[in-house]
Amino acid sequence: MPNLSLDVGDAAELAEILQFFCDWLAAEHGGLGASLQRYVGRPAGGITQLRADLDRFTSYSAVAAANRCSNHASD
């Protein structure tokens, strides 16, 4: 995996917006699955897969922000 560097504030903001989408998808029990399938045009794992991907990316962003903070604290 390539090395990616994000500003601490950007990583935290990215984690927040991804968490917002995760929470929204978890709370929405209506027609989002059908809407996603129409938008994508084929089965792509649906809402469950999208939520798993968002959770993973949220975790990566949070870890990146935490690592950057701890690296700056030791400077």
Image: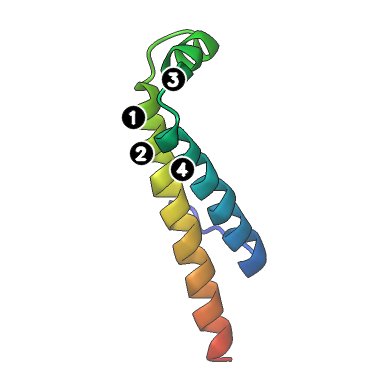
Q: Which residue is mark 3?
A: 30
Three-letter amino acid code at disc 3?
Gly
Dot 3 or dot 1: first in sequence order is 3
Label 2, label 1: how far apart the Cα atoms are: 6 Å
Q: Are marks 3 and 4 in contact (CB under 8 Å)?
A: no
Q: Nearer the viewer, mark 2 or mark 3?
A: 3
Of the 4 image quadrants, the one containing the C terminus is bottom right
In this view, 27 is above or below 11 = above
Label number found at residue 35: none
Label 3, label 1: how far apart the Cα atoms are: 14 Å
Rendered image quadrant of residue 29? top left
Q: Which residue is mark 2?
A: 52
Residue at 44% across, 65% down: 63
Q: Position of residue 48 (x, y in %)?
A: 34, 29
Q: Which residue is mark 4?
A: 23
Q: Residues within 10 Å of mark 1 (few under 14, many from 20)?
A: few
Three-letter amino acid code at disc 4?
Asp
Dot 2 or dot 3: first in sequence order is 3
Dot 3 or dot 4: first in sequence order is 4
Q: Are marks 2 and 1 in contact (CB under 8 Å)?
A: yes
